[in-house]
Image (cartoon, helix red, strand yellow):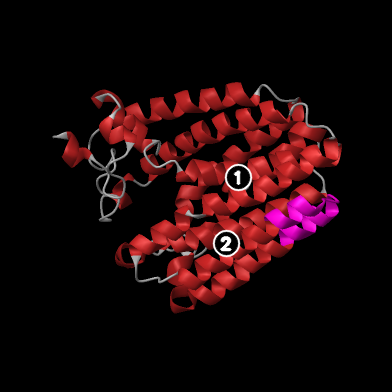
Amino acid sequence: MSDTSARVADSTGNWVDTLAPQWARPYLRVSRFDRPIGSWLLLMPCWWSAALAGAMAHDIRSLPLTIVLFLVGAFVMRGAGCTWNDITDRDLDAKVERTRSRPLPAGQITVKQALAFMIAQALIGLAVLLQFNRFAVATGIASLVIVAIYPFMKRVTWWPQVFLGLAFSWGALMGFAVTFGRIDITALVLYAGSIAWVIGYDTIYAHQDSEDDALIGVKSTARLFGAHTHQALILFYGLAVVLIGVALASGDVRWPAWLGLAAFAVHLAWQIQRLRIDDPALCLRLFKSNRDAGLLLFAGLLADAVMRAA
């Protein structure tokens, strides 16, 4: 098989296709290093919580290292999670146009090879986690339960995006676990706000596959909401902004954080206004734009943390 035919349908022309060694490409693809947007979205709540906790502690001396460790951890653990997802979904992926060229259904690597690679990524994630206090280590390990069950949820519930939200928002708890050695109400409200955000953006993402999902019986909020997706996004994105705002108020933030939240809210409103659920390419672009939305909020929180620690 030529490498051109081995490329994943919805990810071409990236650094994996052009720069990575041939033998490494299926592994990099199964862990989505050719599509880092998911890693960025997993990272955003981690950075939010680290900056907010640092601001509340009036101490950001450890924040740069925490930011770097969260960056590494998010990328390798998202890779491990995607590898697990592809192992469990390999038969379903073979039936969907967008995913049938992924390494496992395409036969580029075996299940045993994918499992070994998943374990290697998880061990790197564990090495990162062990740099933190015991409570943070235990909190991080607890997330694996949700990660393990998430791939099966699309088979049994119309709300698999909720379980993705539980997993992808876990970082909203980690910043507080690392900084304070506990999880308080501020962290929990931030976590809830992030879950609402994830439900929104992953509904947009799922609209790419809604027709194929209907044919093979896979459930999603995209199929559930259908023509009412815009109204659902208003609800969930609005809930995200409100809950994150409550968390910021609980953390007694200053104006830079509020400015960041306002920019975040405007970005989400822009997504809703732009969305056309029958345009898969647009759905993908809007989904990816959530990295920028998350970075706008993080910039405000980071500026607040620096200001309060001065």
What's under tag 1, amino acid-wise? Met
Q: Secondary structure at mark 2?
A: helix
Residues at discs 2 and 1 in contact (Cβ within 8 Å): no
Q: On the rendered structure, is 95 left or right of 157?
A: left
Residue 26 shows which numbered tag? none
Q: Residue at x 38, y 63 (%)?
A: 282
What's under tag 2, amino acid-wise? His
Per the rendered image, the range of residues in magenta is 243-260
Residue 239 position within the rendered picture, expressed as x and y whole percent measured from the top left? 67, 66
**What residue is shown with label 2?**
267
Bin the neighbour count of mark 2 within 10 Å (Cα to Cα): few under 14, some 14-19, many 20 and up: some
Vertical relation: 79 (above or below) 52: above
Mark 2 or mark 1, whichever is nearer to me:
2
**What residue is shown with label 1?**
44
Residue 307 position within the rendered picture, expressed as x and y whole percent measured from the top left? 81, 41
Q: Secondary structure at mark 1?
A: helix
Residue 41 position within the rendered picture, expressed as x and y whole percent measured from the top left? 54, 47
Q: Earlier in the sequence, mark 2 or mark 1?
A: 1
Q: On the rendered structure, is 258 left or right of 209?
A: right
Q: On the rendered structure, is 150 left or right of 19?
A: right
Q: On the rendered structure, is 161 left or right of 264?
A: left
Residue 201 position within the rendered picture, expressed as x and y whole percent measured from the top left? 51, 59
Is residue 155 part of the magenta span, yes or no?
A: no
